[in-house]
Image (cartoon, coloured by chain):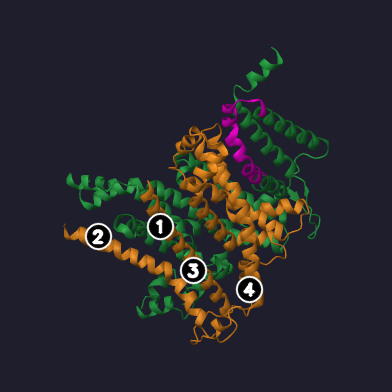
Chain colours: A orange, B green
Amino acid sequence: MSTSSRVGRWGINAVAILGFIYLFAPIFVIILFSFNDPAGKFNIQWSGFTLDNWADPFSEKQLTDALLVSLRVAFVSTIISTFLGSLMAIALSRYKFKGQGGVNLFLVLPLTSPEVVIGASLATLFLNRSVEFGYTTVIIAHVMFQISFVALTVRARIRGFDWGLEQAAMDLGASPMRAFWKITFPLILPGILAASLLSFALSIDDFIITFFNAGSLVTFPLQIFGASRVTIPPQINILATMILLASVGIMVLGAVAGSIRRKRLGQTL
Amino acid sequence: MTRTQRLASFTERPELVGLGVLLLLGSGVILLAAEITSGALAYVVGGLMALALVGYATTIVRGTSDDRRSIAPYALLKPGVLWLSIFFLAPLWALFVMSLSSKESRFDFFPDFTWEWANYQEAFTRFRPQFIRSFTYAGIATLLTILIGFPIAYVIAFRGGKYRMLLLGLVVIPFFTSYLIRTLAWTTLMSDNGPVMNTLETLRLVTVFEWLQIVDDGRLLSTPAAVIGGLTYNFLPFMILPIYVSLEKIDTRLVDAAMDLYSSASSAFRKVVLPLAIPGIFAGSLLVFIPASGDFVNAQFLGSPNTTMIGNSIQDQYLKQLNYPVASAMSFVLMVIITIGVLVYTKFMGTEELA
């Protein structure tokens, strides 16, 4: 190999390593500053190491309450959107039908609309109808943008699925319902679970659309945004670190479960 | 024709029944939710929707199992399509109506539809700087995500080996922390005595960066560069993942073949790898540019009043000034500009790559 291409090879590796450092720089700051002993109300300048914050992670009551609100919203909206989105994904990947292209475009549209527009337009609909802003409107809004994510993710995950398996079960005398629940459902379940986790994460983190439709309801991102002008306590960093650890934990568990499953299937097939 | 014959010819194309009912119900709920029809007309629309459902049920009950099979997808799509019709399409219509309405006073919460084109005039003149800034910042951020994201995606796809999945996980992990907290962390990183400025000072690069107009008056925070930097960071994975997906599909033997035919490494890259990566780059560009152009969090936390984007103005006009009509006009303009871009794009590339 020539010298110039070897230089190029190391060059691109170096750029990628710098890229990863860039990706993790703020994460490092978030975790580090959860151990900060801030001088004022704003935890943005390093002024000394302390473990006190971690001794009392839930001391900021408004922040903890807001996180609980977010978890509740995410829980409900994820269940609804996973159901609706998965049905759409099955329709799109299992059948060939008239209007399929139109449905695909329809699903992509909410993802290709800026969040401010979605937030403002939904708020306008609610305003016109004098719907009271709060828990319900936030859940409706979240389900709206989650459906597309779930449908497209599940569709991508079950793209290679062999629908002939279901037919085979029915040829062997299973009813369509039984064939679906015994054969199809267990095989597409990992895709559905992955999609629902993704949409749960999207719900917890959504700020812009929620901002327009929350009324007096305060979710975790709204609390951070509202409080950021007055105070930024280290508890924000602690809760963020906890969310991060929980997400990574779920990701690792999912990967492990997936590989165990593949090994088991490999043995039986 | 007897009645049974008519019914038979009706169910000859059961998929048309399915599609027709889906379209009818979808447009029906939009008409009702956005109050395009009201009063007696609303009952007519409701009646038509009920009739459509009866027709659908008849096809299921009277049809053969093949008929049922061909309308099954429409049944599965129905709940999701209806939800999106009511809570995505109907609101867009409501937004359009609002953008042409006028308010009697500041606290008039129900502006009347008056063909108030002046709202659009205000959106274009008073908020022109914000529109220009939004598209400029989002454009630069998109270019930067390509420059930073491509090498990362390339290394994962071609040098990742069995660690590919782990490396992809590492790309996604930072984005499991809250968007707002990540952006707040950048205020720490870019603050006047923060690590970025300190590094620039140690390397004696501050004057160079001031000359490049990245640093302003010894500060990085509150500059356009800070806002663009925040946008670049926050939307980077939306560029890395689609590029990775398109690179992953490349058969490396193509590159070997090019090299065997005496192509240099760089021309093999330009003529083989890059063209095959283009769909990923295009998809990534949309996924970065669209949210970036409507964002107001980065401009709020990292910028100054001189770096406000259209999202800041929409949010301010809508939620603080309660000026719904003008805010709606701005939103609609933003939406139309972006939708035209997306339609042109999907015409050339298809929607598959976006998923």
Is the Cβ of the residue at disc 1 closer than 8 Å to that at disc 3? no
Say which of marks 2 and 3 sits in front: 2
Dot 1 amino acid type: Ile
> The disc numbered 3 marks a residue on which chain?
B
Pointer 2 and pointer 3 on the same chain: no
Residue B115 counted in the magenta span: no
- Residue pictured at 52% horizontal, 51% vertical: A192
Give residue A181's position: percent from left, percent from top.
54, 44
Label 2 secondary element: helix
Dot 2 amino acid type: Gly
Dot 3 amino acid type: Ala
Which of A234/A180 is in front? Answer: A180
What residue did someone put label 3 on? B226
State which region is magenta. Answer: B61-85
What residue did someone put label 1 on? A260
Label 4 secondary element: helix
Say which of marks 2 and 1 sits in front: 1
